[in-house]
Image: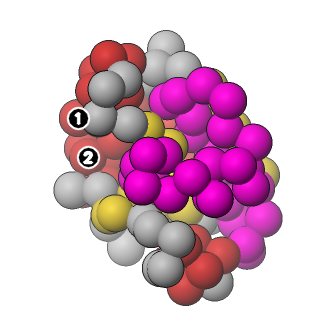
């Protein structure tokens, strides 16, 4: 199951993480976000210990959404050592593609 990232835990969970992190910016009202949600959760289970995977609800964390330039969702950011290394906009992506991108950063 994916973690829940918030404005209060983002620094420790994502920026200071020792493993690569995938952050899924999403919202309750977003259809494509709901479609990709189960894939994100499966990936979190598959890569437990190798990478961190979590979600940021843009309605609850507007400052984070603005900081990272989220204009459309789902918006996936890949972090390594506190820096954004890659991104994917939209839900047109497979679990295998996400896994490959994350493991390439590990």
Residue sitting nearer the eye, 98 or 53: 53
**Of the numbered discs in the image, which one, if any, rests on residue 41?**
2
**Drawn side of residue 92 relative to residue 87, left or right:** left
Q: Residue 17: x, y in percent?
A: 58, 80
Residue 101 position within the rendered picture, expressed as x and y whole percent measured from the top left: 61, 42
- In the rendered image, residue 72 lying in the magenta stretch gets the answer yes
Evaluate if marks 1 and 2 touch, with contact meaning CB atoms under 8 Å apart. Answer: yes
Q: Who's the residue at 66% across and 38% down the image?
A: 70
Crowding at mark 2 (Cα within 10 Å: few <14, some 14-19, many 20+): some
Q: Position of residue 39 (x, y in %)?
A: 30, 34
Colouring used for the render: secondary structure
Q: How many marks?
A: 2
The answer to whether residue 57 is above or below residue 16 is above
Which of the labelled discs sits on residue 67, or is there none? none
59 is higher (above) or lower (below) than 14: above
Q: Which residue is mark 1?
A: 38
Residue appearing at x 47%, y 79% in the figure: 9
Tag 1: Cα neighbours inside 10 Å, few (<14), some, or many (≥20)?
some
Q: Quadrant of the N terminus?
A: bottom left
The kind of secondary structure element at disc 2 is helix
Look at the image and give the residue range highlighted in magenta.
55-84
Work out which quarter of the rendered image holds the C terminus and state it.
bottom right
Q: Secondary structure at mark 1?
A: helix
Q: Is residue 76 magenta?
A: yes
User: Residue 21 in the image: x percent, y percent?
Assistant: 55, 62
Whole-angstrom CA distance, mark 1 to mark 2, is 5 Å
Q: Quadrant of residue 96?
A: top left
């Amino acid at each position: 199951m994916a973690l829940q990232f918030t404005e209060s835990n983002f620094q420790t969970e994502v920026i200071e993480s020792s493993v690569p992190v995938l952050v899924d910016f999403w919202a309750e009202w977003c259809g494509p976000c709901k479609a990709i949600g189960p894939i994100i959760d499966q990936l979190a289970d598959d890569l437990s210990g190798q990478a961190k995977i979590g979600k940021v609800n843009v309605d609850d964390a507007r400052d984070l959404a603005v900081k990272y330039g989220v204009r459309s969702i789902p918006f996936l950011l890949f972090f390594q050592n506190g820096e954004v290394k890659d991104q994917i906009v939209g839900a047109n992506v497979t679990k295998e593609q996400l896994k490959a991108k994350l493991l390439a950063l590990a």
